[in-house]
Image (cartoon, rainbow, N blue to C red):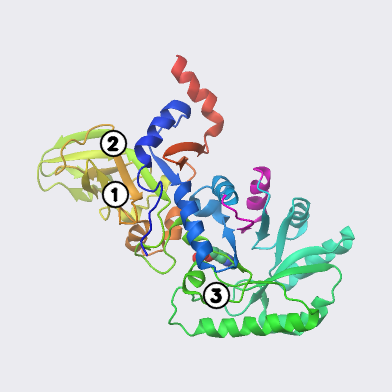
Amino acid sequence: VRRSSPGAAAPVEAADAAVAARLRTLRPTRALVSLDALAANYSYLRERAAGADVLAIVKADAYGHGAVPCARRLEAEGARWFGVAIVEEGLELREAGIRGRILLLGGADGDALRLAVRHDLTPAVVSRESLDALLAHAAESGRPLACHVKVDTGMTRLGLPWTDFLERAPRLAAEPRLRVEGLFTHLACSDDPAVPFTRVQLERFRQCSVAWEQARGARPLLHVASSAGLLTRAETDVELVRPGGALYGLNPFGNQRAPELTPVLTLVSRVVRVVEVPAGTAVGYGSTFITLRASRLATIPLGYDDGLPRQVSDDWEVAVGGGRAPLVGRVSMDLVVADVTDLDGVGVGSEVVVAGGGDGSPALPIEEMAHRLRTIAYEVTSGISSRVPRLFVEGGVVTGIASRFEHLRSVAADAGSA
Ligand SMILES: Cc1ncc(COP(=O)(O)O)c(C=O)c1O
Protein backbone atom coordinates (compact mmCIF):
# COMPACT_ATOMS: atom_id res chain seq x y z
CA VAL A 1 0.00 0.00 0.00
CA ARG A 2 1.45 3.33 -0.99
CA ARG A 3 0.44 5.99 1.48
CA SER A 4 0.73 9.72 1.47
CA SER A 5 3.73 10.98 3.36
CA PRO A 6 3.14 14.26 5.05
CA GLY A 7 6.12 16.48 5.29
CA ALA A 8 8.58 14.12 3.69
CA ALA A 9 9.26 15.87 0.44
CA ALA A 10 8.56 19.52 0.97
CA PRO A 11 10.61 20.75 3.86
CA VAL A 12 13.76 22.08 2.22
CA GLU A 13 12.54 25.55 1.27
CA ALA A 14 10.30 26.00 4.29
CA ALA A 15 13.08 24.82 6.51
CA ASP A 16 15.46 27.40 5.18
CA ALA A 17 13.04 30.26 5.65
CA ALA A 18 12.32 29.24 9.18
CA VAL A 19 15.95 28.74 9.99
CA ALA A 20 16.86 32.13 8.68
CA ALA A 21 14.11 33.66 10.75
CA ARG A 22 14.46 31.86 14.04
CA LEU A 23 17.48 29.70 14.28
CA ARG A 24 21.00 30.06 13.12
CA THR A 25 23.01 27.34 11.53
CA LEU A 26 26.12 28.84 10.09
CA ARG A 27 27.09 26.02 7.78
CA PRO A 28 24.64 25.01 5.08
CA THR A 29 25.01 21.28 5.69
CA ARG A 30 22.12 19.95 7.76
CA ALA A 31 19.86 16.95 8.25
CA LEU A 32 16.16 17.65 7.89
CA VAL A 33 14.11 15.31 10.06
CA SER A 34 10.41 15.18 9.22
CA LEU A 35 8.60 14.49 12.47
CA ASP A 36 5.38 14.20 10.45
CA ALA A 37 6.92 11.34 8.49
CA LEU A 38 7.99 9.76 11.81
CA ALA A 39 4.41 10.08 13.05
CA ALA A 40 3.08 8.52 9.81
CA ASN A 41 5.41 5.53 10.26
CA TYR A 42 4.44 5.21 13.91
CA SER A 43 0.78 5.17 13.00
CA TYR A 44 1.36 2.60 10.26
CA LEU A 45 3.35 0.35 12.61
CA ARG A 46 0.71 0.68 15.28
CA GLU A 47 -1.85 -0.60 12.80
CA ARG A 48 0.42 -3.46 11.87
CA ALA A 49 0.95 -4.29 15.54
CA ALA A 50 -2.72 -5.26 15.67
CA GLY A 51 -3.37 -4.50 19.29
CA ALA A 52 0.15 -4.86 20.68
CA ASP A 53 1.61 -1.64 22.07
CA VAL A 54 4.53 -0.11 20.17
CA LEU A 55 7.71 0.28 22.22
CA ALA A 56 9.54 2.86 20.14
CA ILE A 57 13.25 2.17 19.89
CA VAL A 58 15.01 5.53 20.14
CA LYS A 59 18.50 4.35 21.07
CA ALA A 60 21.56 5.68 19.25
CA ASP A 61 19.99 9.14 19.18
CA ALA A 62 17.00 7.64 17.37
CA TYR A 63 19.33 6.09 14.76
CA GLY A 64 20.87 9.50 14.20
CA HIS A 65 17.54 11.32 13.87
CA GLY A 66 17.60 13.04 17.27
CA ALA A 67 16.20 11.06 20.20
CA VAL A 68 14.57 13.86 22.19
CA PRO A 69 12.47 15.51 19.44
CA CYS A 70 11.57 12.09 18.02
CA ALA A 71 10.50 10.76 21.43
CA ARG A 72 8.54 13.94 22.15
CA ARG A 73 6.63 13.67 18.90
CA LEU A 74 6.05 9.94 19.39
CA GLU A 75 4.77 10.60 22.90
CA ALA A 76 2.40 13.22 21.48
CA GLU A 77 1.21 10.57 19.00
CA GLY A 78 0.42 8.23 21.88
CA ALA A 79 3.62 6.25 22.43
CA ARG A 80 3.88 5.01 26.01
CA TRP A 81 7.03 2.91 25.78
CA PHE A 82 10.53 3.77 24.62
CA GLY A 83 13.62 1.64 24.27
CA VAL A 84 17.21 2.80 24.74
CA ALA A 85 20.51 0.95 24.88
CA ILE A 86 22.33 2.78 27.64
CA VAL A 87 21.44 4.64 30.81
CA GLU A 88 22.64 8.00 29.49
CA GLU A 89 20.13 7.77 26.65
CA GLY A 90 17.34 7.15 29.13
CA LEU A 91 18.43 10.02 31.37
CA GLU A 92 18.51 12.32 28.36
CA LEU A 93 14.86 11.49 27.63
CA ARG A 94 13.82 11.98 31.25
CA GLU A 95 15.64 15.31 31.42
CA ALA A 96 13.71 16.38 28.31
CA GLY A 97 10.45 15.56 30.06
CA ILE A 98 9.54 12.23 28.45
CA ARG A 99 7.13 10.57 30.85
CA GLY A 100 6.56 7.19 29.17
CA ARG A 101 8.13 3.96 30.30
CA ILE A 102 11.75 3.65 29.21
CA LEU A 103 13.23 0.19 28.84
CA LEU A 104 17.01 -0.13 29.16
CA LEU A 105 17.69 -2.81 26.58
CA GLY A 106 21.34 -3.07 27.51
CA GLY A 107 20.71 -3.47 31.25
CA ALA A 108 22.58 -1.59 33.96
CA ASP A 109 24.61 -2.25 37.06
CA GLY A 110 26.50 -0.28 39.72
CA ASP A 111 26.07 3.48 39.58
CA ALA A 112 24.26 3.22 36.25
CA LEU A 113 21.62 1.00 37.86
CA ARG A 114 21.20 3.34 40.83
CA LEU A 115 20.67 6.28 38.49
CA ALA A 116 18.35 4.27 36.28
CA VAL A 117 16.10 3.35 39.20
CA ARG A 118 16.12 6.90 40.56
CA HIS A 119 14.95 8.21 37.19
CA ASP A 120 12.36 5.52 36.60
CA LEU A 121 14.16 3.71 33.80
CA THR A 122 13.24 0.03 33.63
CA PRO A 123 16.33 -2.18 33.45
CA ALA A 124 16.44 -5.39 31.48
CA VAL A 125 18.06 -8.46 32.98
CA VAL A 126 20.62 -9.26 30.31
CA SER A 127 22.97 -11.76 31.97
CA ARG A 128 23.44 -13.75 35.16
CA GLU A 129 25.60 -10.95 36.50
CA SER A 130 23.00 -8.31 35.75
CA LEU A 131 20.39 -10.43 37.54
CA ASP A 132 22.66 -10.50 40.61
CA ALA A 133 23.13 -6.74 40.36
CA LEU A 134 19.37 -6.13 40.29
CA LEU A 135 18.80 -8.47 43.23
CA ALA A 136 21.53 -6.74 45.24
CA HIS A 137 20.15 -3.31 44.42
CA ALA A 138 16.63 -4.33 45.42
CA ALA A 139 17.90 -5.80 48.68
CA GLU A 140 19.79 -2.58 49.41
CA SER A 141 16.82 -0.35 48.65
CA GLY A 142 14.31 -2.59 50.43
CA ARG A 143 11.91 -2.33 47.52
CA PRO A 144 11.10 -4.79 44.72
CA LEU A 145 12.65 -3.74 41.47
CA ALA A 146 10.60 -3.66 38.25
CA CYS A 147 12.43 -5.17 35.30
CA HIS A 148 12.06 -7.04 32.03
CA VAL A 149 14.00 -10.26 31.52
CA LYS A 150 15.70 -10.73 28.19
CA VAL A 151 16.06 -14.34 27.14
CA ASP A 152 18.74 -15.36 24.68
CA THR A 153 16.96 -17.80 22.39
CA GLY A 154 19.65 -17.95 19.75
CA MET A 155 21.02 -14.50 19.00
CA THR A 156 23.91 -15.33 21.35
CA ARG A 157 24.60 -11.76 22.26
CA LEU A 158 22.68 -10.61 25.32
CA GLY A 159 20.14 -12.14 27.69
CA LEU A 160 19.81 -15.08 30.05
CA PRO A 161 20.43 -18.22 28.00
CA TRP A 162 16.98 -19.77 27.44
CA THR A 163 17.87 -23.11 29.07
CA ASP A 164 19.18 -21.18 32.05
CA PHE A 165 15.92 -19.24 32.19
CA LEU A 166 13.83 -22.44 32.09
CA GLU A 167 15.80 -23.79 35.02
CA ARG A 168 15.60 -20.58 37.02
CA ALA A 169 11.97 -19.68 36.26
CA PRO A 170 10.44 -21.18 39.43
CA ARG A 171 12.97 -19.42 41.70
CA LEU A 172 12.77 -16.19 39.77
CA ALA A 173 8.97 -16.18 39.84
CA ALA A 174 9.03 -16.57 43.62
CA GLU A 175 11.73 -13.90 44.08
CA PRO A 176 10.25 -11.10 46.22
CA ARG A 177 13.02 -8.63 45.29
CA LEU A 178 12.05 -8.50 41.62
CA ARG A 179 8.86 -7.53 39.84
CA VAL A 180 9.32 -9.11 36.41
CA GLU A 181 6.95 -7.10 34.25
CA GLY A 182 8.15 -8.26 30.88
CA LEU A 183 9.83 -11.17 29.18
CA PHE A 184 11.46 -10.67 25.79
CA THR A 185 13.84 -12.00 23.22
CA HIS A 186 15.46 -10.73 20.04
CA LEU A 187 15.33 -12.54 16.70
CA ALA A 188 18.52 -13.05 14.74
CA CYS A 189 17.07 -13.60 11.26
CA SER A 190 13.64 -11.96 11.14
CA ASP A 191 14.78 -9.85 8.19
CA ASP A 192 14.56 -13.01 6.08
CA PRO A 193 11.21 -14.76 6.58
CA ALA A 194 12.53 -17.83 4.73
CA VAL A 195 15.08 -18.59 7.44
CA PRO A 196 13.67 -21.40 9.62
CA PHE A 197 15.75 -20.40 12.65
CA THR A 198 13.14 -17.78 13.58
CA ARG A 199 10.70 -20.65 14.28
CA VAL A 200 13.33 -22.26 16.52
CA GLN A 201 13.77 -19.04 18.48
CA LEU A 202 10.01 -18.52 18.77
CA GLU A 203 9.54 -22.05 20.08
CA ARG A 204 12.28 -21.57 22.69
CA PHE A 205 10.68 -18.30 23.74
CA ARG A 206 7.26 -19.97 23.93
CA GLN A 207 8.68 -22.55 26.32
CA CYS A 208 10.12 -19.78 28.46
CA SER A 209 6.85 -17.88 28.63
CA VAL A 210 4.92 -21.06 29.47
CA ALA A 211 7.44 -21.89 32.20
CA TRP A 212 7.04 -18.41 33.61
CA GLU A 213 3.26 -18.53 33.56
CA GLN A 214 3.25 -21.91 35.26
CA ALA A 215 5.64 -20.74 37.94
CA ARG A 216 4.12 -17.36 38.49
CA GLY A 217 0.49 -17.93 37.63
CA ALA A 218 0.42 -14.75 35.55
CA ARG A 219 1.53 -13.68 32.13
CA PRO A 220 4.18 -10.96 31.84
CA LEU A 221 4.35 -8.50 28.96
CA LEU A 222 5.80 -10.55 26.14
CA HIS A 223 7.78 -8.95 23.32
CA VAL A 224 9.82 -10.34 20.46
CA ALA A 225 9.59 -8.44 17.18
CA SER A 226 11.70 -5.52 16.03
CA SER A 227 10.86 -3.81 12.70
CA ALA A 228 11.31 -6.85 10.48
CA GLY A 229 9.47 -9.23 12.79
CA LEU A 230 6.63 -6.77 13.12
CA LEU A 231 6.31 -6.20 9.38
CA THR A 232 6.26 -9.96 8.71
CA ARG A 233 4.24 -10.73 11.83
CA ALA A 234 6.81 -13.31 12.93
CA GLU A 235 4.77 -13.61 16.11
CA THR A 236 1.38 -12.30 17.11
CA ASP A 237 0.59 -13.31 20.68
CA VAL A 238 2.47 -10.48 22.37
CA GLU A 239 1.80 -7.31 24.33
CA LEU A 240 4.60 -5.18 22.86
CA VAL A 241 6.57 -4.82 19.62
CA ARG A 242 9.91 -3.02 19.39
CA PRO A 243 10.43 -1.31 16.03
CA GLY A 244 13.35 1.03 15.54
CA GLY A 245 14.45 1.40 11.93
CA ALA A 246 10.96 1.25 10.45
CA LEU A 247 9.91 4.23 12.56
CA TYR A 248 12.56 6.21 10.71
CA GLY A 249 11.37 4.91 7.35
CA LEU A 250 14.38 2.62 6.98
CA ASN A 251 13.86 -0.73 5.33
CA PRO A 252 14.72 -3.52 7.78
CA PHE A 253 14.79 -6.15 5.03
CA GLY A 254 17.38 -4.92 2.61
CA ASN A 255 18.67 -2.09 0.58
CA GLN A 256 15.63 -0.98 -1.41
CA ARG A 257 13.23 1.70 -0.29
CA ALA A 258 10.35 0.22 1.70
CA PRO A 259 7.30 1.60 -0.15
CA GLU A 260 5.00 1.34 2.86
CA LEU A 261 7.30 3.48 5.00
CA THR A 262 7.94 7.21 4.73
CA PRO A 263 11.51 8.51 4.61
CA VAL A 264 12.20 10.72 7.62
CA LEU A 265 15.68 12.14 7.08
CA THR A 266 17.11 14.22 4.25
CA LEU A 267 20.76 15.22 4.26
CA VAL A 268 21.14 18.56 2.49
CA SER A 269 23.75 21.22 1.83
CA ARG A 270 24.53 24.07 -0.54
CA VAL A 271 27.19 24.58 -3.17
CA VAL A 272 30.00 26.81 -1.87
CA ARG A 273 32.15 27.08 -5.01
CA VAL A 274 31.80 26.43 -8.74
CA VAL A 275 34.75 26.32 -11.14
CA GLU A 276 35.13 25.74 -14.86
CA VAL A 277 38.12 23.54 -15.60
CA PRO A 278 39.65 22.14 -18.80
CA ALA A 279 39.85 18.45 -19.68
CA GLY A 280 42.69 16.76 -17.86
CA THR A 281 42.11 18.48 -14.50
CA ALA A 282 42.71 16.35 -11.42
CA VAL A 283 40.23 16.53 -8.55
CA GLY A 284 40.77 15.89 -4.85
CA TYR A 285 43.24 13.93 -2.73
CA GLY A 286 45.26 11.47 -4.70
CA SER A 287 44.05 13.03 -7.97
CA THR A 288 41.89 9.94 -8.36
CA PHE A 289 39.53 11.69 -10.78
CA ILE A 290 40.72 13.45 -13.93
CA THR A 291 38.19 15.35 -16.04
CA LEU A 292 37.78 13.89 -19.51
CA ARG A 293 36.19 17.07 -20.88
CA ALA A 294 35.90 20.74 -20.01
CA SER A 295 33.88 20.56 -16.79
CA ARG A 296 32.01 22.58 -14.20
CA LEU A 297 32.72 21.39 -10.71
CA ALA A 298 30.74 22.27 -7.61
CA THR A 299 32.16 22.00 -4.12
CA ILE A 300 29.79 20.86 -1.36
CA PRO A 301 30.73 21.44 2.30
CA LEU A 302 30.22 17.92 3.53
CA GLY A 303 32.71 15.17 4.11
CA TYR A 304 33.50 12.04 6.01
CA ASP A 305 33.55 13.84 9.33
CA ASP A 306 29.87 14.62 8.70
CA GLY A 307 29.09 10.99 7.97
CA LEU A 308 29.48 10.89 4.20
CA PRO A 309 31.74 7.87 4.08
CA ARG A 310 34.91 8.03 2.04
CA GLN A 311 33.87 4.79 0.32
CA VAL A 312 31.28 6.68 -1.75
CA SER A 313 34.07 8.62 -3.46
CA ASP A 314 33.33 8.50 -7.20
CA ASP A 315 30.31 6.31 -6.40
CA TRP A 316 27.33 8.51 -5.56
CA GLU A 317 25.13 11.10 -7.21
CA VAL A 318 23.61 14.08 -5.48
CA ALA A 319 20.48 15.96 -6.51
CA VAL A 320 21.17 19.57 -7.51
CA GLY A 321 19.80 22.07 -10.01
CA GLY A 322 16.89 19.82 -10.95
CA GLY A 323 19.13 16.90 -11.92
CA ARG A 324 21.73 14.47 -10.68
CA ALA A 325 25.42 15.18 -10.41
CA PRO A 326 28.05 12.51 -9.76
CA LEU A 327 30.54 12.98 -6.94
CA VAL A 328 34.03 13.12 -8.37
CA GLY A 329 37.33 12.62 -6.59
CA ARG A 330 37.73 11.51 -3.03
CA VAL A 331 35.38 12.53 -0.28
CA SER A 332 37.56 14.50 2.11
CA MET A 333 36.97 15.35 5.75
CA ASP A 334 34.86 18.47 5.22
CA LEU A 335 34.25 18.73 1.47
CA VAL A 336 33.30 16.83 -1.62
CA VAL A 337 33.08 17.81 -5.29
CA ALA A 338 30.27 17.10 -7.77
CA ASP A 339 30.44 17.30 -11.56
CA VAL A 340 27.64 19.67 -12.61
CA THR A 341 28.75 20.10 -16.22
CA ASP A 342 25.47 18.76 -17.56
CA LEU A 343 23.23 20.82 -15.30
CA ASP A 344 22.21 24.39 -16.01
CA GLY A 345 21.93 26.95 -13.32
CA VAL A 346 24.00 25.38 -10.56
CA GLY A 347 25.85 28.13 -8.74
CA VAL A 348 27.11 29.09 -5.34
CA GLY A 349 24.19 28.67 -2.94
CA SER A 350 22.38 26.01 -4.98
CA GLU A 351 20.58 23.54 -2.74
CA VAL A 352 21.99 20.00 -2.82
CA VAL A 353 20.22 16.91 -1.58
CA VAL A 354 22.93 14.43 -0.65
CA ALA A 355 20.83 11.53 0.60
CA GLY A 356 17.35 10.58 1.72
CA GLY A 357 14.12 12.41 1.24
CA GLY A 358 11.57 11.66 -1.41
CA ASP A 359 7.91 11.07 -1.18
CA GLY A 360 7.70 7.32 -1.15
CA SER A 361 9.27 7.38 -4.59
CA PRO A 362 13.02 7.06 -4.48
CA ALA A 363 14.84 10.34 -4.23
CA LEU A 364 18.28 9.36 -3.06
CA PRO A 365 17.33 6.50 -0.78
CA ILE A 366 19.47 5.95 2.28
CA GLU A 367 19.10 2.25 1.43
CA GLU A 368 20.80 2.89 -1.91
CA MET A 369 23.75 4.55 -0.21
CA ALA A 370 23.89 1.64 2.24
CA HIS A 371 24.01 -0.74 -0.71
CA ARG A 372 27.00 1.12 -2.18
CA LEU A 373 28.69 0.96 1.22
CA ARG A 374 27.92 -2.74 1.71
CA THR A 375 26.11 -1.95 4.93
CA ILE A 376 22.55 -1.29 6.08
CA ALA A 377 20.57 1.95 6.12
CA TYR A 378 20.67 2.05 9.94
CA GLU A 379 24.43 2.51 9.86
CA VAL A 380 24.19 5.37 7.37
CA THR A 381 21.81 7.51 9.45
CA SER A 382 23.49 6.59 12.75
CA GLY A 383 26.76 7.66 11.16
CA ILE A 384 25.66 11.22 10.38
CA SER A 385 27.84 13.00 12.85
CA SER A 386 27.04 15.49 15.57
CA ARG A 387 28.68 18.19 13.43
CA VAL A 388 25.57 18.12 11.25
CA PRO A 389 22.68 20.00 12.89
CA ARG A 390 19.32 18.24 12.84
CA LEU A 391 16.43 20.48 11.85
CA PHE A 392 13.05 19.12 12.91
CA VAL A 393 10.27 19.81 10.46
CA GLU A 394 6.57 19.69 11.32
CA GLY A 395 3.81 20.93 9.06
CA GLY A 396 6.45 22.17 6.62
CA VAL A 397 8.24 24.44 9.08
CA VAL A 398 11.23 23.96 11.30
CA THR A 399 10.08 23.59 14.87
CA GLY A 400 13.39 22.75 16.49
CA ILE A 401 17.05 22.21 16.04
CA ALA A 402 19.53 19.88 17.66
CA SER A 403 23.11 20.93 17.28
CA ARG A 404 26.37 20.16 18.98
CA PHE A 405 27.04 23.89 18.61
CA GLU A 406 23.79 24.97 20.25
CA HIS A 407 25.70 26.69 23.06
CA LEU A 408 27.32 28.96 20.45
CA ARG A 409 24.00 30.39 19.35
CA SER A 410 24.54 33.64 21.26
CA VAL A 411 27.98 33.97 19.68
CA ALA A 412 26.44 33.33 16.28
CA ALA A 413 23.74 35.91 16.93
CA ASP A 414 26.46 38.52 17.53
CA ALA A 415 27.50 38.19 13.89
CA GLY A 416 24.20 39.80 12.90
CA SER A 417 24.77 42.92 14.99
CA ALA A 418 28.39 43.53 13.99
C1 LIG B 1 16.59 -5.70 21.57
C2 LIG B 1 16.24 -4.87 20.39
N1 LIG B 1 14.96 -4.67 20.09
C3 LIG B 1 14.59 -3.92 19.02
C4 LIG B 1 15.51 -3.34 18.19
C5 LIG B 1 15.06 -2.54 16.99
O1 LIG B 1 15.41 -3.18 15.81
P1 LIG B 1 14.98 -2.53 14.40
O2 LIG B 1 15.63 -1.22 14.32
O3 LIG B 1 15.44 -3.47 13.37
O4 LIG B 1 13.49 -2.41 14.46
C6 LIG B 1 16.87 -3.54 18.46
C7 LIG B 1 17.87 -2.94 17.57
O5 LIG B 1 18.99 -3.25 17.51
C8 LIG B 1 17.24 -4.32 19.58
O6 LIG B 1 18.53 -4.52 19.88
Nearer-N-terminus badge (2/3): 3
Q: Residue 58: x percent and y percent?
A: 56, 55
Residue 78 painted magenta:
yes
Q: Secondary structure at mark 2?
A: loop
Magenta residues? 77-97
158 lies left or right of 176: left
Q: Which residue is mark 2?
A: 271
Q: Secondary structure at mark 3?
A: loop
Measuring 14% from the left and 37% from the top, which residue is drawn there? 277
The residues bearing labels 2 and 3 have C-alpha atoms spaced at a distance of 44 Å
Nearer-N-terminus badge (2/1): 2
Q: Check disc 1 and give the amino acid type.
A: Arg
The residues bearing labels 2 and 1 have C-alpha atoms spaced at a distance of 17 Å
- Residue 386, visible in the rendered structure: yes
Asked if disc 2 and disc 1 are in contact, CB closer than 8 Å, the reply is: no
Q: Residue 65: x percent and y percent?
A: 49, 49
373 lies left or right of 131: left
Q: How many marks?
A: 3
The label shown at residue 24 is none
Q: Nearer the viewer, residue 273 or 95?
A: 95
Q: Residue 211: x percent and y percent?
A: 73, 84
Q: Quadrant of the C terminus?
A: top left
Q: Secondary structure at mark 1?
A: loop
